[in-house]
Structures are given as C-alpha cells and as structure tokens.
Amino acid sequence: MQPTHLSMAVDVSQKITLADHVATQTYPLVKDPKILLTACQYLADAGEAIKQEGRKLTQEQFETIETVQKIVQQHKDSPIEFRRKQNFVICQDDYKFSVLNQDTVNRHIKVMRTLL
C-alpha cells in the first residue's frame, strides 16, 4: 500500500518536529553533541519524503536537504568521529571533516520548517 499525500505530509511534519525537539530541548539537557546526529537523521528522513512527493523546492531548501543527507551518509561511512567542545566532528578517509553543532542544526531546521 502506497502512503497517501496526507500521511506523507504528517510524517514530514512529525520528523521535523522531532528534530526540533532534539535540538532545542534534549541537546541542552544532555550537552552531548552526538545527539545532534539524531536530529540530522530526522531531517534527512523528512527530506527524502519531500523529494518522493515531488514538491518544488527553492535552491536553499534543496541544498539544505542535500547537506543533511550528506552529513548522515558521512556519519555512516566515517572511520572516526569525536566531540570537540560544543561540536561533533566527523572525519573522512581523505582527511576532510564535517563539523556539526547546535547552530548548524537549528539553521537546517529553520529551512526545513519552510516546507511545512
């Protein structure tokens, strides 16, 4: 059974709301930047659902979805990750790295909220 447009919209809304809750409520309590990956995963799932719907996206929305999905993929492929102060650093094999922090995640959430 294929999901309906309404159920996909509700799912996207829930994923973005969960990401927002993790970034604004849970993260300040636990002070562990690794939990920001959970918020990114929710945003990546919402972005994938939005792409499947075939919605028209602005350049900023498209880039945000691509960036969040890239972060999640880098996390999966990463040989090493570590916390550094308020940041979560994801290293790659070719000595490149991505830095994830609360400001970055909040910016992505703000852009994703425009899709609701």
Image (cartoon, grey):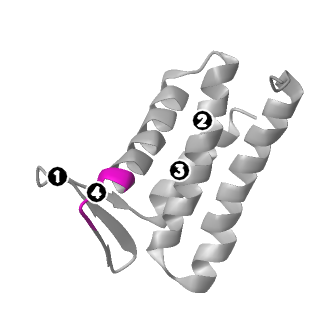
Which element carries disc 3, helix, strand or loop? Answer: helix
Looking at the image, tell me whether mark 2 or mark 3 is earlier in sequence order.
2
Looking at the image, tell me whether mark 3 or mark 1 is earlier in sequence order.
1
Three-letter amino acid code of the residue under disc 2 = Gly
Whole-percent x, y for residue 50 in the image: 66, 28
Residue drawn at 39 percent across, 41 percent down: 70
Looking at the image, tell me whether mark 2 or mark 4 is earlier in sequence order.
2
Give the CA distance from mark 2 to mark 3.
Answer: 15 Å
For label 1, the residue is 96
Give the CA distance from mark 4 to mark 1.
Answer: 10 Å
- Magenta stretch: includes residue 37: no
- Magenta stretch: includes residue 79: yes
Give the label on residue 78, or none.
Answer: 4
Three-letter amino acid code of the residue under disc 3 = Arg
In the figure, is residue 5 to the left or right of 43? right
Whole-percent x, y for residue 60 in the image: 50, 29
Tell me the quadrant of the picture where the C terminus can be found. Answer: top right
Which element carries disc 1, helix, strand or loop? Answer: loop
Three-letter amino acid code of the residue under disc 1 = Lys
Residue drawn at 58 percent across, 75 percent down: 27
For label 3, the residue is 107
Give the CA distance from mark 1 to mark 2.
Answer: 25 Å
Give the CA distance from mark 2 to mark 4.
Answer: 22 Å
